[in-house]
Image (cartoon, coloured by chain):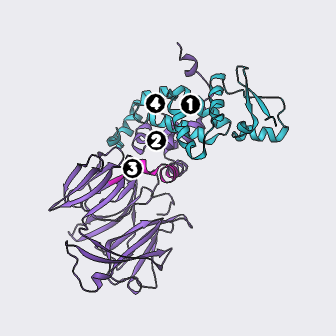
Amino acid sequence: MSKKTLTLMSKDKQLFNIEEHLAVQSVTIRNMVKEDGASSVIPLPRVDSETLALVIEYLNRQQAPEEDEDYVKKFVDERGEIPTLLELAQAALDLDIKKLMDAACMKVADLIKDFTLEEVREALRIENDRTPEEEKAIRDEFQWAF
Amino acid sequence: MANRKKITLPELSPEIVLFHILPKLPGKSLLRFKCVCKQWQSFLTTPLFANIHLHHVTNVDRSRHEKVIILRNRFTSFETIDCEDALLCYPFGGYNLIFVSSVTVNGLVCLGIEQRNTNEVFDFDIILWNPLTGEYKTLPKPSGVYQYNMFELYYTCSDDDYKILSINNHGNVYIYSLRSDSWRMLESRVEDHIPYVAAGDHNLLDGKLHFLRDLAQKEGESPGWLSRTWIIEMWRMNGDGGWTNMVNISYTHYDNRIRPLHLMRNGNLIMRTEKDDCSEICKVDPQKNTVDVLCSRPKMDFTPMYIETFVSPNQYGVN
């Protein structure tokens, strides 16, 4: 009996094949398959090919359920760069793969928890819209945390 | 310029950052990160965020967030010890403490604070306090209850309410509800159910208050430091007043002055010991057989376990 294969297309138009029973760990893909049978290519216009390759590597894992938790942690640990983790988290959110998204976000949180304010803004692409006075008011209120 | 592409990517949604990354950060980092931008500051003070963060620290990741909070009555200061890093922090100071409930609930602590009025007459306030955010609420006091009575904070899921149970020296039970911001007295007295309950011999397990009753004490034996047999009954207080006998234990114990506080994920133990006139919080490494004293204080009075949350004591808006 041959296993059914799906084709996913990244933002930069690269094609990836994956067995359907593995792909439907993504709730988003599962719903698409249910709706229209998904015989053709599934476009993922927000996910670039580098990130999609990672997601597919994760979906293809062959892990016993009891080892899965450790595997997800290790999987994100090995990709410890914040930009990669953020994109992985975003793709996992869009594709609704909860475990992967939680693990990637947990890793980001661990990495940034001791960052300076400027480092946090840079890592998460946030613009500083605080005046120095506003910042000082918070510093004064929660002095012990700084 | 290799990173340029990543930095300018427009696809990172606020949802990822606000709902999935921020709630996983420690409380201390979050206080600092209020400075990052206006959106973060306003989001971090919403009840929605308090709930998401609370869910994470209580259901997903509790052991990483557990702390010992050290509250001393004569030294007017508060300290916390982070159980996983075994580090000491000094966040607060400036109150004169009378009592504190032995349990903290969802990051809230119930305190009794000394209040001296102009006539130098001793009085006290009951405070519900979030040590992380510094937010507090002064609660009304029931008549017939004094500062040396027992005050215990707990939470009831069924009506999403924080409650305080107080038992006075006549065995009358009073229950405070944060939602209604009022006290009521129960019809049945606690001594009808569990006589000889001693303050300190109770704990919050699975969200319900459990009391220990020492039968040996009832039979007139003096509780000394030497080995003796303890006969213990554990009673659970159900919701608002019913009692169930849960466990009966009989065991021989040498010293009741060591108390485990937290089992670290690396197998080490945080515990409290008493030595003559001082209390110590220690980290014990069973593998290396070493004991590190994290802090030693002249008689610590209260060291409840504590987690940092953003839960507001003023969330129900009643004044």
Q: Position of residue B219 (x, y in %)?
A: 28, 86
Q: Is mark 1 on a helix, strand or loop?
A: helix
Given contact means CB atoms under 8 Å apart, are the residues at marks 1 and 2 in contact? Answer: no
Q: In this view, does A19 lie above or below B131?
A: above
The CA distance from mark 1 to mark 2 is 15 Å
Specify the principal SS of the magenta part.
helix
For label 4, the SS is: helix
In the figure, is residue B110 to the left or right of B97? right
**Residue A143 visible within the image:** yes
Q: Give the range drawn in magenta.
A: B54-68
**Spatial separation of the CA atoms under disc 4 and disc 1:** 13 Å
**Amino acid found under the numbered disc labelled 1:** Leu
Quadrant in the picture for residue B250: bottom left
Q: B238 or B122: nearer the eye?
A: B238
State the SS at label 2. Answer: loop
**Residue at image mark 4:** A120
- Marks 3/1: CA distance? 28 Å
Residue with the most extreme left position: B276
Count up the numbered dots. 4
Amino acid type at circle 4 is Val
